[in-house]
């Protein structure tokens, strides 16, 4: 473990898991991407109140069922003064509507594709059957309507999201605005007493005419660069709370490639959940948490008891490659503002949350090697591969048996970090290693995307319960589109 922390978490104070925490940058003097303004210099309006996300309405009154319609379609929004920006949106909303459902629900969502190209909806992180997973093997053609239908088993409560996963156009479709949260609630949520806020972080890059700029060769090398970060569709929104109040924040990283190393000025916070829901016990206090592309965290924040104060939620400077080409400058995300009211007392977080079950011993082992072709970082689009091969949906790269517990060693031999996502199940980090040393994960957590820093190996333990073909891929969307993806076939026992 050299320069990254377990599960993206640095513990404040004694016993830090992150040696060298607070640096995290590339070589000094290298130009940094991710500046605050698009090439045209046009800034988005900022400092408006944090938007509450619209919820996708349930069309059925039947208990235990959720039925709704999504339309993916072009839409024009006024993001810059005096100009409209053409986007692709779910139900006309930036970001799309929140699917807010309960464990045990049967979900039925009809997607109508009014886009000019194939799309799908991938229910990121949810254990849905392979044929409902919205993989690139199952495109929804322009003009077509596709019904996705699945059950949400007990134990799935957590913060997920949905987004397109069409062959070679996922990055484009997400950059145009297609992404939204999917929240599954438990009947016995130990944090139900906390007010909660969902914060979906996306990125947008507009050209001089106010349009979303297409991906560049640089984007396809190190991931989309130079986006302005939005929270719930707004630039630097202000989230106002009564002084001293305690809240549960669900934070989702729906950017193409932007690692979010989050800190909140003047505050420590408590990590209570990861991709697949609550931890066994709270972790903290933390001064920062790393949320890789596609990952989610749930944190509990107790705001300062000072009335009328302002604090910045910031994505700290973060380098994702060894040559400084994918280095993200520190960027402010949101302002936490305390009101002029008198302070309230904090709310307690229980010392145990939800057991994270052990998967038991692995009966099989796989090794996945992240490779690159070409010369260094100059190799360009498609240079990052899995096991040296570009994605081919007609090829099976790995075979597993449903119900088997497996350890997967994911070894990153490339010059940059990759967040690796496996469809179909949640898994657990076992250990991280580099240079022959492995360090066990400090606590159990359900995740569906594991960050694998350059030169390191992450070992994950996983059980796939449903047969079918599943995607294994980098969630830097440009890498995924350019071929850094493999097919896992899960065979019935
Ligand atoms: Cu990648």
Image (cartoon, rainbow, N blue to C red):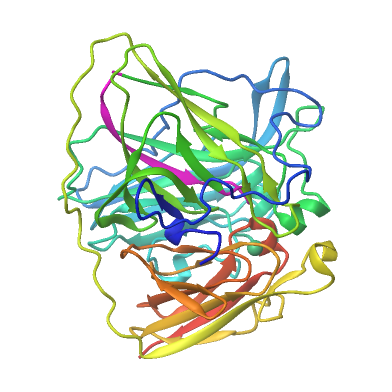
123, 292: nearer the viewer: 292
- Please tell me which residue lies in front, 293 or 21: 21
- Picture quadrant of ligand 1: bottom right
Q: Residue furthest top?
A: 340
- Residue at figure coordinates x 59%, y 84% from the top left: 397
Q: Is residue 58 visible?
A: no
Residue 122 located left or right of residue 373? left
- Residue 238 visible here: yes
Residue 306, position in %: x, y? 32, 16
x and y, in percent, of residue 128 in the image: 39, 66
Marks counted in the figure total 0
Frontmost residue, 458 versus 10: 10
Quadrant of res 230: top right
**Residue 138 at x, y = what percent?**
57, 67
Q: Is residue 336 left or right of residue 103?
A: right
Q: Magenta segment, which residues?
A: 242-259
Q: Is residue 255 magenta?
A: yes
Q: Residue furthest front?
A: 14
Q: Is residue 335 magenta?
A: no
Q: From the viewer's perspective, is 414 left or right of 421?
A: right
């Amino acid at each position: 473990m050299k320069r990254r922390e377990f599960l993206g978490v640095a513990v404040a104070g004694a016993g830090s898991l992150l040696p060298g925490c607070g640096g995290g940058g590339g070589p000094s003097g290298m130009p940094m991407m991710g500046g605050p303004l698009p090439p045209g210099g046009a800034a988005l309006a900022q400092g408006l109140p944090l938007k509450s996300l619209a919820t996708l309405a349930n069309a059925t009154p039947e208990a235990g069922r959720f039925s709704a319609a999504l339309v993916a379609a072009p839409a024009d929004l006024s993001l810059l003064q005096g100009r409209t920006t053409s986007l692709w949106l779910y139900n006309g909303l930036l970001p799309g509507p929140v699917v807010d459902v309960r464990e045990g629900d049967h979900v039925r969502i009809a997607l109508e594709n009014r886009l000019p190209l194939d799309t799908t909806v991938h229910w990121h992180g949810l254990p849905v059957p392979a044929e409902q997973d919205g993989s690139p093997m199952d495109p929804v053609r322009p003009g077509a309507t596709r019904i996705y239908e699945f059950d949400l088993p007990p134990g799935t409560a957590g913060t997920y999201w949905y987004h397109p996963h069409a062959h070679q156009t996922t990055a484009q479709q997400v950059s145009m605005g297609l992404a939204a949260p999917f929240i599954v609630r438990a009947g016995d949520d130990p944090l139900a007493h906390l007010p909660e806020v969902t914060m979906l972080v996306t990125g947008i890059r507009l050209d001089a005419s106010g349009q979303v700029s297409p991906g560049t060769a640089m984007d396809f090398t190190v991931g989309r660069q130079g986006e302005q970060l939005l929270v719930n569709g707004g630039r630097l929104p202000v989230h106002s709370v009564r002084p001293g109040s305690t809240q549960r924040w669900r934070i989702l990283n729906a950017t193409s490639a932007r690692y979010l190393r989050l800190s909140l000025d003047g505050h420590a916070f408590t990590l209570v959940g990861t991709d697949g829901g609550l931890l066994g016990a709270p972790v903290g206090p933390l001064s920062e948490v790393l949320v890789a592309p596609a990952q989610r965290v749930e944190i509990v924040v107790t705001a300062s008891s000072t009335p009328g104060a302002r604090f910045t939620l910031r994505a700290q400077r973060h380098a994702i490659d060894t040559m400084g080409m994918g280095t993200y400058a520190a960027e402010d995300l949101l302002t936490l503002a305390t009101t002029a009211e008198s302070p309230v007392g904090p709310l307690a977080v229980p010392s145990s949350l939800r057991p994270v079950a052990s998967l038991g011993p692995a009966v099989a082992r796989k090794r996945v090697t992240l490779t690159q072709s070409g010369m260094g970082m100059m190799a360009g689009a498609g240079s990052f591969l899995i096991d040296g091969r570009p994605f081919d949906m007609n090829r099976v790269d790995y075979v597993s048996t449903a119900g088997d517990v497996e350890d997967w060693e994911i070894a990153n031999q490339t010059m940059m970090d990759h967040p690796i996502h496996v469809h179909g199940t949640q898994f657990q980090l076992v250990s991280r290693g580099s240079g022959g040393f492995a360090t066990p994960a400090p606590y159990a957590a359900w995740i569906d995307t594991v960050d694998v820093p350059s030169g390191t190996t992450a070992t994950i333990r996983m059980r796939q319960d449903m047969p079918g073909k599943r995607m294994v891929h980098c969630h830097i969307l440009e890498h995924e589109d350019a071929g850094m993806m493999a097919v896992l076939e899960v065979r019935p026992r």
